[in-house]
């Protein structure tokens, strides 16, 4: 829950730069993303079963592979530490923990 009593969005960018603050709305986030160079707007899904596979894949992306997505399966298997580990590799993390797509 946010300070204003609103539910946090189920999917959010979690990093030093891309954290959705209490007052940042979807429009503001999209504007910030549009400011990135095109090659930095690509998000690589880390749809792997475990922490080490995720770190290996993220490490193989090179310096331009900035954003990675951690879904519910990886987060459940590896825990929240995988987000910190990926940030330690210089990756921006899109944390997608939704249970259903609609």
Image: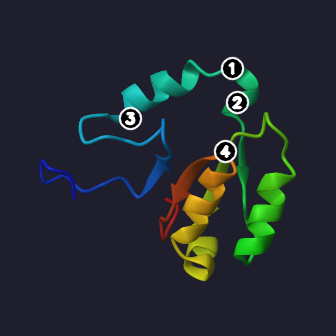
Left or right of 71, for residue 24: left
What residue is pinned by disc 2? 40
Q: Find residue 83 and report its horizontal and vertical position in percent.
A: 56, 61
Which class describes the residues within 10 Å of circle 4: few (<14), some (14-19), or many (20+)? some
Badge 2 local density, few (<14 within 10 Å), some, or many (20+)?
some
Neighbor class of circle 3 (other Cα within 10 Å; few <14, some 14-19, many 20+) is few
Question: How far is mark 3 from mark 2, CA to CA?
Answer: 19 Å
Is 46 placed left or right of 95 in the picture? right
Do residues under tags 2 and 1 come within 8 Å of each other at their CB atoms? yes
Name above or below for residue 7 compared with residue 49.
above
Q: Which residue is mark 4?
A: 90
* Residue depicted at 48% across the width and 41% down the height: 16
Residue at (66, 44) in percent of width and height: 90
Looking at the picture, how far across and down is residue 57, in whole percent? 82, 59
Residue at the disc numbered 1:
37
Residue sitting farthest toward the front: 88
Number of marks present in the image shown: 4
- Badge 2 marks a residue whose secondary structure is helix
Packing grade of label 1 (10 A; few <14, some 14-19, many >=20) is: few
Q: Secondary structure beneath disc 4?
A: loop
């Amino acid at each position: 829950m946010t300070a204003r009593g609103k539910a946090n969005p189920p999917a959010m960018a979690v990093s030093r730069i891309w954290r959705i603050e209490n007052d940042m709305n979807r429009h503001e986030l999209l504007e910030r993303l549009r400011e990135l160079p095109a090659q930095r707007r690509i998000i690589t899904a880390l749809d792997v079963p475990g922490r080490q596979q995720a770190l290996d894949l993220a490490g193989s992306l090179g310096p331009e592979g900035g954003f990675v997505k951690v879904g519910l399966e990886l987060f459940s298997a590896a825990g929240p530490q995988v987000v910190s580990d990926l940030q330690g590799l210089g990756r921006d993390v899109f944390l997608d923990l939704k249970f259903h797509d609609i």
